Image (tube, helix red, strand yellow):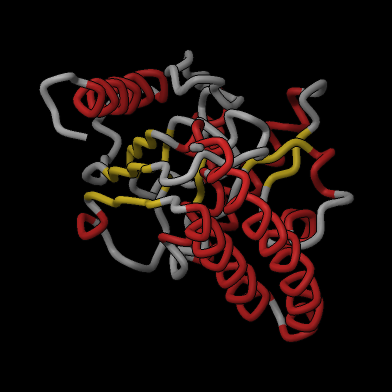
Amino acid sequence: MKRIRDWLFTVPTVAAFGLTLGVFHLIGLCALPFGQRPFEKAMAGLQRTLVAVFRISGIRVVTEGRDGFSSDGGFIFVSNHQSMYDVPIFGGLLPRNYPKYVAKKELARGLPSVSLNLRHGGNALIDREHRDQAMDAIADMASEAERRDVSVVIFPEGTRSRAGELGDFRVGGLAAIMEAAPNLPIVPTAIEGSWRVFQRNMFPIPYGTKVRVRFGEPMFRLPGESPVEILDRCQAWIGQTLQEWRSPDRAA
């Protein structure tokens, strides 16, 4: 019965998902001639709407720590990465921070709204086969984010986890961001449960999945602290948060 229920709600969710991408692609195209900020507002609307769309399948996003930093302005969000649902979560929860992302260049074509945002939204499109190009693109994104007082999101694992496990954090991307945007505070962020949303490649979506997001207190680079050390602090905080949530002594 649960499988049938999952399918019953997946069909309208996927239909609404596709419709949302199509509609906001047109909205984004219309916003582009008016400049960067109108386009960013359109894409923020896209991500907030995508989070709302998944409520059709009972997906609940529970947020903690959102009041620990400004609702606008520039930050570096360092997060674990469980699924592609993580991206609209950030955009939906932080619409006035206008978060920018690192994405492989292949995603810049063929996806309505998503590719448009990646090409025109100030994100870093990287070629994973060419490290120098990737680091330059990330640095350019970060320096422009600091100049415009908007935010950057980085997933240091470099890929999505299959079952929510925390992978190794790679320092290269964060080091490039910190060097290019030294004045942006760093906010460690833990996400739990989003991997379940796409564990079956979206067909069907498990009804009623609970996704948790916790933002930590903003961190500032200590005197003499290296990017590796600050990344270790972020990874330790994220790992501790995940362990706390998964503890059998803690209520779901």
Tell me which residue sits at (41%, 60%) in the image: 93
Residue 29 spot, x, y in % from top left = 81, 76
Tell me which residue sits at (71%, 41%) in the image: 137
Q: Residue furthest front?
A: 1
Classify 139 as above or below 71: above
Tell me which residue sits at (78%, 32%) in the image: 133
Residue 166 spot, x, y in % from top left = 42, 18
Q: Is residue 134 left or right of residue 244?
A: right
Q: Residue furthest right?
A: 110
Judge by depth and name the residue closer to the eye, 221 or 124. Answer: 124
> In this rendering, does residue 179 appear at all?
no
Residue 176 spot, x, y in % from top left = 56, 33
Classify 50 as above or below 247: below
> In this rendering, does residue 241 appear at all?
yes
Judge by depth and name the residue closer to the eye, 132 or 50. Answer: 50
Residue 120 spot, x, y in % from top left = 75, 62
Tell me which residue sits at (63%, 30%) in the image: 200
Q: Residue furthest top?
A: 168
